[in-house]
Amino acid sequence: MFYLVDSLKRLRALRILRENKYLLLFFLGISVLFALYMWTVEGLSLLDTYYFLVTTATTVGYGDISPKTGFGKVFVTVYMVVGIALLGLFLGKVTEVMVDISSRRKRGLIRMKDKIDLIITGYPSDDKVENIVAELRNDDRYKDLGIVCVNNQLEEKPAWMTALNVHFVKGVPSDGSVLERAGIQTASTLLILANDSRRIESDDLSTSVCAVVEKLRPEVRTIIEKVRKDGLLFEVVNADTVVDVAAPSVLAQEILDPGAIELQNAIFSTHTDGTQYNLVFSGEDAKWSDIAMAVLKTDSIPEGYQNPGERSFRLLPKQGEQVKTGALVKYRGTKVLGNLSL
């Protein structure tokens, strides 16, 4: 429906009515005369007049209705020739406009009409951006939400964007007019990716984008990747979430559920509370629910276990699962625990 409405607007405003208005007025005039003649002279009903008008103009000619007078027959032949000429012109213009719209959409030259929820700026690689979107689309909350990628690196919209229902807007993302074309007016989140994780100059573009968004719509939540270790520049532009160059899954989680970056940093740093640890369970075989309760009593958070001989951890296990003697129990806490008391 959106494509149809957009096409009709272009046809009406730019092409047919303006460039061919005299021909269209001529056709409209002769159509009115044709209809009046068939109604008043040939004696057709209003419905039959409309039906005969359309079938004649399109040269369908079913033969179920035909003029009885000689002048009527001449009138029909003239009107038929005019109809063929105008129909060909009209279809040509429609095709031209539809091709133009499709081309502009593919080259990222359109303005978003639908509601946009997420704008992604920066384009480090096809794989990274595609994987971020794939992670989001895998979550029911983002399955149908509007996503736009804004960058000036791509010449055309890649196939993966079409497959994942992602829009593309070409332009410098720090340009306010480009962001407005991308739908910043309705966006709730802006993800700013570092174009090149090896160059700190990427941060300059990222922070300029953030600064423009803070000016246009400060309520938009900004998540920004940084290359440099110093975070002062990002504080200046008032970024909501700043993260070192991260994996697609981590960035997607931060979009879905704010705080994912903080949780990751806590788990994988010995400088913060909530670091992950393992302990060897030396008691008799027990249910996971008993193990989990014992861990909670130490002000720690149980995460899962790995029984002897198994190659991977069972994370978020069911309550009734059996934890065997010698199993590794994974938990998050502030200290290394000894044996558990069940």
Image (tube, rainbow, N blue to C red):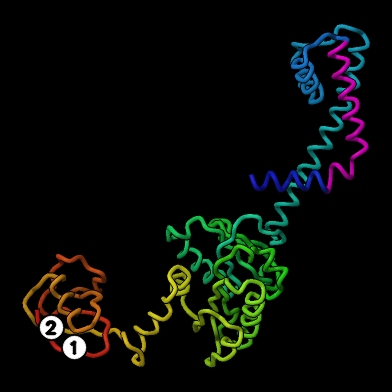
Disc 1 from disc 2: Cα separation = 8 Å
| Residue 159 visible in the current orientation | no
Residue that sits furthest to the front in the current view = 219
The verdict on residue 23 being magenta is yes
> What number is the disc on residue 199?
none
Vertical comparison of 200 with 140: above or below: below
Q: Is residue 3 left or right of residue 239?
A: right
Percent coordinates x, y for residue 51 in the rendering: 75, 19
Q: Is residue 146 left or right of residue 289?
A: right
Residue that sits furthest to the left in the current view = 284
Numbered disc 1: secondary structure: loop
Label 2 is placed on what type of residue?
A: Leu
Task: Quadrant for the C terminus, please.
Answer: bottom left
Front-most of residues 198 and 303: 303
Label 1 is placed on what type of residue?
A: Leu
| Residue 11 visible in the current orientation | yes
Task: Quadrant for the N terminus, please.
Answer: top right
Q: Is residue 9 left or right of residue 283?
A: right
Front-most of residues 121 and 218: 218
The residue that appears at 85% across and 14% down in the rendered structure is 38
Please name the residue that numbered disc 1 is placed on.
337
Magenta stretch: dominant secondary structure: helix
Numbered disc 2: secondary structure: loop
Which residue range is magenta in the image?
Answer: 14-40
Percent coordinates x, y for residue 218 in the rendering: 60, 74
Please name the residue that numbered disc 2 is placed on.
340
Q: Are marks 1 and 2 in contact (CB under 8 Å)?
A: yes
Percent coordinates x, y for residue 47 in the rendering: 74, 17
The residue that appears at 55% across and 63% down in the rendered structure is 117
